[in-house]
Amino acid sequence: MSDLLDMRSLDVESRAVETQRIIRTGTVWLAAAVLAPVIGLGPLVAAGWRPFDLPLLAQLAFWLGTVAAALGVAALVWAGCPVLGFRLADAYRQKVACIRIGIVVNLSGMALCGLAILLSPA
């Protein structure tokens, strides 16, 4: 019976298991980070709206948020990609930082873009 249950495979706190979880959740966060702006901005752009229609301060906030969101997406891409050329300990450390930073920076950037659009005069 003990041959059937390898205790290492049940260790959900191991770096290997945690790295696999980060890769899976990083992929889901990446999909959400890519689809959310498309769903939100797609109808606006289709209706003829352009970021250059915003007042200067709102335009600055919009483009700053866009850059921040893009940097967050880049970090989520790194978090979601498989471990190829790094030792597990290094990959684990990188992926933990990338998913945490990527989520915060991406959501902050999208929130800034949304506020720039919603708070600008019509």
Image: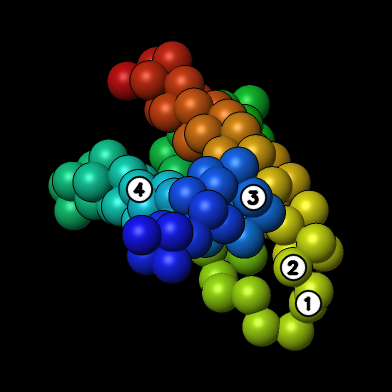
Callout 2, which amino acid? Leu
Tell me the residue that label 4 is attached to.
Answer: 32
Tell me the residue that label 3 is attached to.
Answer: 14
Tell me the residue that label 1 is attached to.
Answer: 86
Q: In this view of the protein, can residue 22 be seen by the observer?
A: no
Task: Give yes or no for contact between labels 2 and 4 (Cβ–Cβ under 8 Å).
Answer: no
Tell me if 45 is positioned left or right of 107 in this view: left
Q: CA distance from mark 2 to mark 3?
A: 11 Å
Label 1 vs 3, first from the N-terminus: 3
Callout 4, which amino acid? Ala
Question: In the figure, residue 76 lies in which quadrant?
Answer: bottom right
Q: Helix or strand or loop: what does disc 3 sit on? A: loop
Q: Position of residue 8 (x, y in %)?
A: 57, 57
In front of the other: label 2 or label 3?
3
Tell me the residue that label 2 is attached to.
Answer: 88
Label 1 vs 4, first from the N-terminus: 4
Residue at 44 percent of width and 15 percent of height: 119
Q: CA distance from mark 1 to mark 4?
A: 27 Å
* Crowd class of label 3 (few under 14; some 14 to 19; many from 20; radius 10 Å): few
In front of the other: label 2 or label 1?
2
Vertical placement of residue 77 versus 39, above or below: below
Callout 3, which amino acid? Ser
Callout 1, which amino acid? Phe
In front of the other: label 1 or label 3?
3
